[in-house]
Amino acid sequence: MKLVKLGLASILTATVLFAGTYNVDASHSNVGFKVKHLMISNVTGKFDKFNGSFVFDEKTNMLKSLKGEAEVASINTENEKRDGHLKSADFFDAANFPKVTFTLDKIDNDKAYGKLTMRGVTKAVELDYENNGTITDPWGNKRVGLGLSGKINRKDFGLSWNKTLEAGGVVVGEDVKLEIEVEGILAK
């Protein structure tokens, strides 16, 4: 039994030696989304304030963990009136649910599986995963680039406000396309 424990400890130690914790560089990252408007066009938006960190193993070139959060009050669709409506109880209810969070469960090839929480509702989600590589920047900082994208149904998270159009259809589509680009800097 002691040999098994020693072996497991050695494996964990070796993994830690090659894995590093990276902090999200918000100035070079984006947490964006796109949703249908009036069934004929798309409205794009993003969260201006977000943070997170992740563990990336350079030896295996694998993402091991990721946690991130966005401040709902920072939602930005380039329209102040619409942003106010999105922050209201009709949608995100920022007063009662100030954060959107994501926690990675696992990576399997080009898929990321994790838990997304909005408006107090947590759901398992599957996203497309892209490893954009590692680099040492001109200032000596180790950086990793990652991409996550996919589609969720906003109603699954309690964002159900809508209006029916006279000609049929609705004001806001149910499907929301997520586009997340993350650049992380190795923590020192």
Image (cartoon, grey):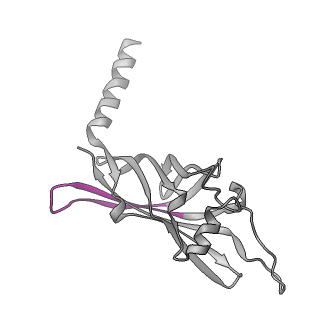
| As drawn, 81 above or below 139 | below
Task: Give percent across and percent down for residue 171.
Answer: 73, 77
* Residue at point 36%, 60% (across, down): 26
Q: Quadrant of the C terminus?
A: top left
Taking the view exactly as shown, the residue that stands out farthest to the left is 139
Task: Give percent across and percent down for residue 134.
Answer: 28, 58
- The answer to which of 94 and 29 lies nearer the viewer is 94
**Magenta run includes residue 92:** no
Give the number of callouts: 0
Please indicate whether residue 169 sits to the left or right of residue 87 in the image: right
Task: Give percent across and percent down for residue 170.
Answer: 77, 77
**Magenta run includes residue 142:** yes
| As drawn, 158 above or below 16 | below
Indicate the quadrant where residue 48 lies.
bottom left
- The answer to which of 74 and 127 lies nearer the viewer is 74
Q: Does any portion of residue 147 appear in the rendered image?
A: yes
The residues colored magenta run 129-149
Q: Does any portion of residue 176 appear in the rendered image?
A: no
| As drawn, 30 above or below 57 | below
| As drawn, 40 above or below 74 | below
Please indicate whether residue 93 sits to the left or right of residue 16 in the image: right
* Residue at point 47%, 55% (across, down): 109
Q: Kindly report the secondary structure that dominates the magenta region of the rendered protein.
A: strand
Q: Quadrant of the N terminus?
A: top left
* Residue at point 44%, 47% (across, down): 66
- The answer to which of 87 and 50 lies nearer the viewer is 87
* Residue at point 53%, 59% (across, down): 73
Task: Give percent across and percent down for residue 166.
Answer: 84, 85
